[in-house]
Structures are given as structure tokens and as C-alpha cells.
């Protein structure tokens, strides 16, 4: 199909935005004085930037481009079900508050797993979490390259490498400080563009015509009592709990925000995010009502935008797509690098590493992880989608050890390991034999009774002061 | 159960107003925080 823009304009826009992020990365790198500035943005981030970074990180390219696909294929339940993925973000608020209370100078989720459940559980956590992070990184990089190719006609390898390289450089320069700063701008880009494009497209069509068109062409898309839709919506909510609760991407943001805004930051960030897939998903309804002939489901929103607003619509879609891709990829780079720097390098290799050395280790890891990501994404591995489904099922098995381990002294390392293994096994089994969409729920539902049973059989009496002792060790270093 | 038109219209309007409200909230909050030197960043 014909790209939305001429090749020159497409390259100009994509490269222009890349240069903009590099400029901000350089500008904000001058704010970096300590390792804390680099890995947790100085721990004083306020409500506006805090809630925006939460929203932007959770808003991937899939949120704006796959939501119309769900709107098209599953109708109202697809839109609402995707939106329920924001529940995990909102429910992380109290957890983030507890994390800050327990570990005021902590940095990573690995800190918690090691101190709370010991080395064995920490090792299992690190393997599962990093497999998930790598799969997520590669799929985001691939998604970026594929979308730039599909929408703008930019060759896959150039687009993918360009996005990854820009992310590496500005994240390496400014660490989480640059990531949350660019996230703020990117969140404004995403929301402002989507709230212009979709309402104008619907107004041009008319709400009456939208409804009657869907009712005539695909009436089942307006059906709210569908077992498959209910299963999808429930799985989406559970999926988000597992993805968010375990991931260092979110733990570093908990540590980055000020105490008085951390809970509200997640609540507002989650609410902000929930509206995006619902509104973007309604583009799927427009496609049904108008009988849009699209070459690929990811093209629904771009085609509707250009149809409603011409070149301006195409430009606004560039803002949404680039904002969504960069905001997630940079967060993954920063979150994964700090997890490896703190939990492998500082904890296992060089416990007396200086503050300056930790900054450079983080930077080296960002480059290394970025290069590995680009190397995998170069070959467009078809198995990455499956890996992310399997690893997501596994991380859903970690929900209970994390939640209960933060609030109760009773769960022990045996209950944590048993529930993680049982939940992971159930998730993988369901993903391979029933449906990948049921894997997260199966993992979480299986892990819970195992966790409760083993906590009853092998209870712990965890001493909460061990977190402050671990914190003091970090401070002394 | 096929949902009526008011439900579909309401859902889309709610999402639109939600995003507009979020934009106003983000911009007004950042302006307030910049004035009060409390962006923390």
C-alpha cells in the first residue's frame, strides 16, 4: 500500500523527533550528580511528571494501534477489556507507597526479593524477570521498526535501529531523569493527538451513523455479554497486575516519586491510561461502520486520521506512535539496566563500588542491553510473541509473593518459590494447550492456593527491620 | 445483549472527556509545581 507521506517527509519527521530526544537527553544529563539521580531520578519527582511517566510507560505502541484491532474484532468488550489493563497501574499505588516506606533508600525490585525471601527466590525472580524484560524490549523494538515501515514506508532495519540507538543515547546520558522528562512530553503528545483525531473522525461520521453502521455490519460487536469478551477482560486485568507488580520499571518509579505523591501518581497515571485504549479502540467501530478497507489492522487509526484530517491527521499519528514507542523502550532500558547494575554488579561483584562507578556501570549496561535488543530484533524472531506470553504467565505467578510479602511477615521463601513454580507451570500449560489469553489468569489462580497452603505449612516471622539494615548498608557504601 | 446507542456514545464521550481532563490536570499541575518549585525534577 501507499505510505501516508513521501519518503522525505517521513524521514524528516522521524529523524527530527530523534534529534529532539537526544537534545533533551543531553540537556538533562547535566542534572545528574549522583547514582540516585541516574537510577531513581533523585527520589523527589512530583505529581505531574510522576503520573505522566506512569501513563506514558504503560502506553506502548500496541495501546494505540492494537486497541482499534480489538475494537474491530471484539467490539465493546475489546475496548473496555483493554482499558481494564489500567487497573494494575492503579492498584500498584498502595504497593508503591509501601515500597517507599519499607525501603526509603532502595533502588530495585531485586533488593526486595533478596532481602525478603533470600538468594534462591531472588535467583528465580531474576531469571523470570529478565527473560520477560528482554522479550518485552525486543518486541517493542520490532514493533517500532514494523510500524515505521507499515505506516511511513521506512525500511524496517533502519527504523528499528534508529529508534533503539536514539533511546540508548538519551537514556545513557540522562538515566531515569531523562526518561521521566521525555515521558512527560510524550504523554502530552499521545493524549493531545488521540483526543483530536478520534472525536473529529466520529463527529464527521456522526454518532448515529457510527452506531447504525456497526449494528448493520457487525451487530455482535455491540454485545456486552460474551464469554470470550469476559475472559479477555479478566485476563487483561490480571495480566497487568503481574506485569507491573514484579517489574523493576515500576519499582524504580516508586522510588523516584516523592512520598506525598506516590500513591496519587499511580492512581492518576492509571486513570489517564485507561481512556486511551477505549478512545483508540473506537476507531475499530468507525472501521466497521464505514466498511473501511484496510491492508493491516495496525493501519486502522492512521487511515482514519488521514481521512478525517488529511496531512495533519498523519502528523498527529506520528506524534502518537513515536511517543508511545520511545516512552516504553527507554523505560525498559533504564529499568533493566538498574536491575542488573544493582542486583548483579553491586550485590555480587563489587559491593564497595563508588557512586561514580555505579553510574558508569549503568551506562555500559544500557548500551549492552540496547545492542542485544537490536541484535535480536534485527532477525525479527517469530518466537518473541510466544516468549512474552510465557514469561508474562510466569510473572503473574509472582503477584502473591510480592503483594503479601510487602504487607505480612508470614510468607516464607518456601511459599514464594512453590507458588512461583506452580503458577508458572499452570500458566505455560494453559498457554500451550488452551489459549495464550488464559495463561495469566491460570498462573495467578494456581499460585494463590499454593502460596496460602505453603505459608500455613511453612510460615516465616520476617523481621521488617532487615529492610532498614539493608538500606543502611547501601547508605554506608 | 446488544448495547443501546446511548451506551456507545456515552463510552466514547467519557473517554474523550477523560483524556481532555487529564491534559488539563497535567498542564495545570506542572505549572503549579513549576511556580512552587516542586516538580522535584
Image (spheres, helix red, strand yellow):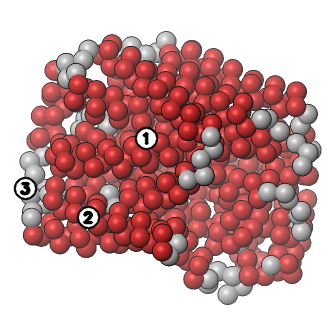
Picture layout, residue A104 above or below residue A214: above
Q: Are dots 1 and 3 on a single chain?
A: yes
The subunit carrying tag 2 is A
The answer to whether mark 2 and mark 3 are in CB contact below 8 A is no
The subunit carrying tag 3 is A
Judge from the rendering whether residue A198 lies leftward or rightward of residue A278; answer left or right.
Answer: right
Find residue A333 and report its horizontal and vertical position in percent.
48, 33
Find residue A68 and report its horizontal and vertical position in percent.
72, 60
Give the labeled residue for mark 1: A249
Circle 1 residues within 10 Å: few <14, some 14–19, many ≥20: many
Cα distance in 3D space between marks 2 and 1: 23 Å
Query: Image point 85% across, 78% down: which residue?
Result: A217
Circle 2 residues within 10 Å: few <14, some 14–19, many ≥20: many
Mark 2 or 1, closer to the camera: 2
Cα distance in 3D space between marks 2 and 3: 18 Å
Camera-side residue: A472 or A449?
A: A449
Under circle 2, the secondary element is helix
Q: Sequence-wise, which precedes: disc 2 or disc 3?
A: 2
* Res A461 label: 3
Query: Image point 37% across, 47% down: which residue?
Result: A129
Total marks shown come to 3
* Res A419 label: 2
Under circle 3, the secondary element is loop
Query: Image point 56% across, 33% down: which residue?
Result: A375
Q: Sequence-wise, which precedes: disc 1 or disc 3?
A: 1
| Any part of residue A130 in sight | yes
Circle 3 residues within 10 Å: few <14, some 14–19, many ≥20: few
Judge from the rendering whether residue A220 lies leftward or rightward of residue A257; answer left or right.
Answer: right
Picture layout, residue A22 above or below residue A217: above
Amino acid at each position: 500500500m501507499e505510505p501516508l507521506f513521501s519518503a522525505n517527509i517521513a524521514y524528516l519527521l522521524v529523524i527530527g523527533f530523534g534529534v529532539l530526544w537526544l537534545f533533551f537527553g543531553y540537556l538533562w544529563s547535566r542534572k545528574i550528580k549522583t547514582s540516585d539521580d541516574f537510577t531513581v531520578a533523585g527520589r523527589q519527582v512530583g505529581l505531574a511528571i510522576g503520573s505522566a511517566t506512569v501513563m506514558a510507560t504503560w502506553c506502548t505502541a500496541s495501546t494505540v494501534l492494537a486497541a482499534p484491532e480489538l475494537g474491530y474484532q471484539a467490539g465493546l468488550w475489546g475496548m473496555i477489556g483493554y482499558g481494564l489493563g489500567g487497573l494494575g497501574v492503579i492498584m500498584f499505588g498502595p504497593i508503591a507507597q509501601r515500597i517507599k516506606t519499607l525501603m526509603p533508600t532502595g533502588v530495585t525490585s531485586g533488593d526486595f526479593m533478596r532481602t525478603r525471601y533470600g538468594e534462591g527466590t531472588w535467583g528465580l525472580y531474576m531469571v523470570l524477570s529478565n527473560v520477560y524484560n528482554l522479550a518485552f524490549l525486543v518486541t517493542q523494538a520490532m514493533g517500532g521498526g514494523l510500524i515505521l515501515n507499515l505506516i511511513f514506508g521506512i525500511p524496517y532495519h533502519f527504523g528499528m535501529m534508529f529508534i533503539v540507538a536514539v533511546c540508548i543515547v538519551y537514556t545513557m546520558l540522562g538515566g531515569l531523569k531523562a526518561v521521566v522528562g521525555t515521558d512527560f512530553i510524550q504523554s502530552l503528545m499521545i493524549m493531545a493527538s488521540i483526543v483530536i483525531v478520534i472525536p473529529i473522525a466520529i463527529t464527521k461520521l456522526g454518532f448515529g451513523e457510527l452506531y447504525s453502521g456497526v449494528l448493520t455490519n457487525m451487530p455482535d460487536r455491540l454485545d456486552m455479554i460474551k464469554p470470550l469478551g469476559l475472559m479477555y477482560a479478566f485476563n487483561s486485568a490480571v495480566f497487568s497486575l503481574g506485569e507491573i507488580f514484579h517489574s523493576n520499571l515500576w519499582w524504580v518509579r516508586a522510588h523516584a516519586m516523592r512520598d506525598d505523591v506516590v500513591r496519587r501518581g499511580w492512581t492518576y497515571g492509571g486513570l489517564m491510561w485507561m481512556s486511551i485504549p477505549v478512545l483508540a479502540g473506537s476507531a475499530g467501530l468507525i472501521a466497521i461502520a464505514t466498511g473501511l478497507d484496510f491492508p493491516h489492522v495496525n493501519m486502522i487509526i492512521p487511515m482514519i486520521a488521514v481521512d478525517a484530517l488529511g496531512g495533519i491527521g498523519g502528523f498527529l499519528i506520528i506524534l502518537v506512535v513515536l511517543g508511545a514507542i520511545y516512552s516504553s523502550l527507554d523505560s525498559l532500558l533504564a529499568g533493566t539496566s538498574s536491575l542488573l547494575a544493582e542486583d548483579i554488579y553491586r550485590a555480587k561483584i563489587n559491593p564497595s563500588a563508588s557512586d561514580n562507578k555505579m553510574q558508569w556501570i549503568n551506562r555500559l549496561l544500557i548500551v549492552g542491553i540496547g545492542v542485544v535488543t537490536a541484535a535480536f530484533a534485527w532477525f525479527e524472531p517469530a518466537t518473541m510473541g510466544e516468549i512474552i506470553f510465557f514469561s508474562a504467565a510466569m510473572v503473574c505467578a509472582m503477584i502473591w509473593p510480592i503483594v503479601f510479602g510487602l504487607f505480612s511477615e508470614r510468607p516464607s521463601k518456601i511459599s514464594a518459590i512453590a507458588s512461583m513454580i506452580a503458577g508458572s507451570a499452570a500458566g505455560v500449560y494453559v498457554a500451550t494447550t488452551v489459549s495464550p489469553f488464559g495463561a495469566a489468569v491460570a498462573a495467578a489462580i494456581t499460585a494463590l492456593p499454593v502460596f496460602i497452603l505453603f505459608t500455613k505449612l511453612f510460615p516465616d516471622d520476617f523481621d521488617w527491620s532487615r529492610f532498614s539494615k539493608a538500606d543502611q548498608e547501601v547508605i554506608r557504601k | 445483549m446488544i448495547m443501546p446507542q446511548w451506551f456507545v456514545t456515552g463510552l466514547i464521550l467519557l473517554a474523550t472527556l477523560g483524556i481532555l481532563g487529564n491534559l488539563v490536570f497535567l498542564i495545570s499541575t506542572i505549572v503549579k509545581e513549576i511556580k512552587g518549585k516542586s516538580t522535584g525534577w
